[in-house]
């Protein structure tokens, strides 16, 4: 395992782990990788993985088609907007969200625009049983142009979905659980895929305004692919400082979210992070792109302390909650 260093040579922050031995190796290799992931999730809640199995040509096509989509006029993009901004589908306009609000922090809106997609499958039986689940299993909204946007982004969603399932298997092994422990808890997931554009900035942001404000993620895990441009992802270390997560070619970022922290009774950490502004705001810094996958369990999965994460000396810190209810509480707070 290699470890990334903070730019000033401070203590290590985010570990880099080769995931190929888990995907392709024997049982001992899979367990060693799972143990490395367990260690990273306990220490910082973030890791960078190589050997993830997502084809590079698919990644490049997805970035290209996303650039083409965001380059269109606002009028064209808005045709693919949802009727309600709290529904995680379709186009979400620039400065229409503020993630710091999920922590009760009032800030100006985040300096990004996004496109959201969800599972292609119809999970209407969950909506019938839980009407509030409708927004999380809403049909996807696809733009008319670019022509290959829908196909490419669906392919990327499926690749993320496969990798997310493999990581949940690794999570189970790292926590000393049967490797299929989470399988029945994510087989009707409401995971969200996003493609994000952080435009070049030519005017100074308002006080406290960032490309994405300080927040923790909401679900089980997040997968993130990023373009290599200035003004990017930062995590808050134990020292209270913000540390860059370097862009390592051929890798992606993995972090756990609030649901996994609840499942592990806070033995794993859902860490504060943000997307910083570029070093200059004179319009010379290029736009930044990212593509993410937020693995959210089945709407009706109960998120409660896992076996082995509670004891007489460490009682459960949270009451059980359905995954969908946890998500609903978060989403309504972030909309401007």
Image (spheres, rainbow, N blue to C red):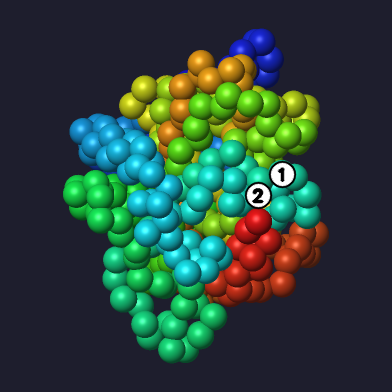
Q: For the residues marked 2 and 1, what is the alpha-carbon distance in whole angstroms?
A: 7 Å
Identify which residue is drawn at 53% across, 20% down: 283
User: How many marks overall?
Assistant: 2
Mark 2 element type: loop
Where does label 2 land, which residue? Answer: 98
Identify which residue is drawn at 31% across, 76% down: 122
* Nearer to us in this view, 245 or 148: 148
Identify which residue is drawn at 46% across, 38% down: 197
Residue 29, horizontal then vertical, whole percent: 35, 38
| Up-down relation of residue 20 to residue 309 (above or below) | above
Identify which residue is drawn at 51% across, 16% down: 284
For disc 2, the neighbor class at 10 Å (few under 14, some 14 to 19, many from 20) is many
* Residue occupying the far bottom of the picture: 128
Residue 80, horizontal then vertical, whole percent: 37, 59
Mark seen at residue 263: none
Residue 231, horizontal then vertical, whole percent: 56, 25
Quarter-of-image position of residue 31: top left
Mark seen at residue 108: 1
| Residue 149 visible (yes or no) | yes
| Up-down relation of residue 265 to residue 51 (above or below) | below
* Nearer to us in this view, 275 or 299: 275
| Residue 18 visible (yes or no) | no
* Nearer to us in this view, 168 or 180: 168
* Nearer to us in this view, 30 or 28: 30
Q: Are marks 2 and 1 in contact (CB under 8 Å)?
A: yes
For disc 1, the neighbor class at 10 Å (few under 14, some 14 to 19, many from 20) is many
If you read the primary sequence from the N terminus, does the residue marked by circle 2 or circle 1 appear first? 2
């Amino acid at each position: 395992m290699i470890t990334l260093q903070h730019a000033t040579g401070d203590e290590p922050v985010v570990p880099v782990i080769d995931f190929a031995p888990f995907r392709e190796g024997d049982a001992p290799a899979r367990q060693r990788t799972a143990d490395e992931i367990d260690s990273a999730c306990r220490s910082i809640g973030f890791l960078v993985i190589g050997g993830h199995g997502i084809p590079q040509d698919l990644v490049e096509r997805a970035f290209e088609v996303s650039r083409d989509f965001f380059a269109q006029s606002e009028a064209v993009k808005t045709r693919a907007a949802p009727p309600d901004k709290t529904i995680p589908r379709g186009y979400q306009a620039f400065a229409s969200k503020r993630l710091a609000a999920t922590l009760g922090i009032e800030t100006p809106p985040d300096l990004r625009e996004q496109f959201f997609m969800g599972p292609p499958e119809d999970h209407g039986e969950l909506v019938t049983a839980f009407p509030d689940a409708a927004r999380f299993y809403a049909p996807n909204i696809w733009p008319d142009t670019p022509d290959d946007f829908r196909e490419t982004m669906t392919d990327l969603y499926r690749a993320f979905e496969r990798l997310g399932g493999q990581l949940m298997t690794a999570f189970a092994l790292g926590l000393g659980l049967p490797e299929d422990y989470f399988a029945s808890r994510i087989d009707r997931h409401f995971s969200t895929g996003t493609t994000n554009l952080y435009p070049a900035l030519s005017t100074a942001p308002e006080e406290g305004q960032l490309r994405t404000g300080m927040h923790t993620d909401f679900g089980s895990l997040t997968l993130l692919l990023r373009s290599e441009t200035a003004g990017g992802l930062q995590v808050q270390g134990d020292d209270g400082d913000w540390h860059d997560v370097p862009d390592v070619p051929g890798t992606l970022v993995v972090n756990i979210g609030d649901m996994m922290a609840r499942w592990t009774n806070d033995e794993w950490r859902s860490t504060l992070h943000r997307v910083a502004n570029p070093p200059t705001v004179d319009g010379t810094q290029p736009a930044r792109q990212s593509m993410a996958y937020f693995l959210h369990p089945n709407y009706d999965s109960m998120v409660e302390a896992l076996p082995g994460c509670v004891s007489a000396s460490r009682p459960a810190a949270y009451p059980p909650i359905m995954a969908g209810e946890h998500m609903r509480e978060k989403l309504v707070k972030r909309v401007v």
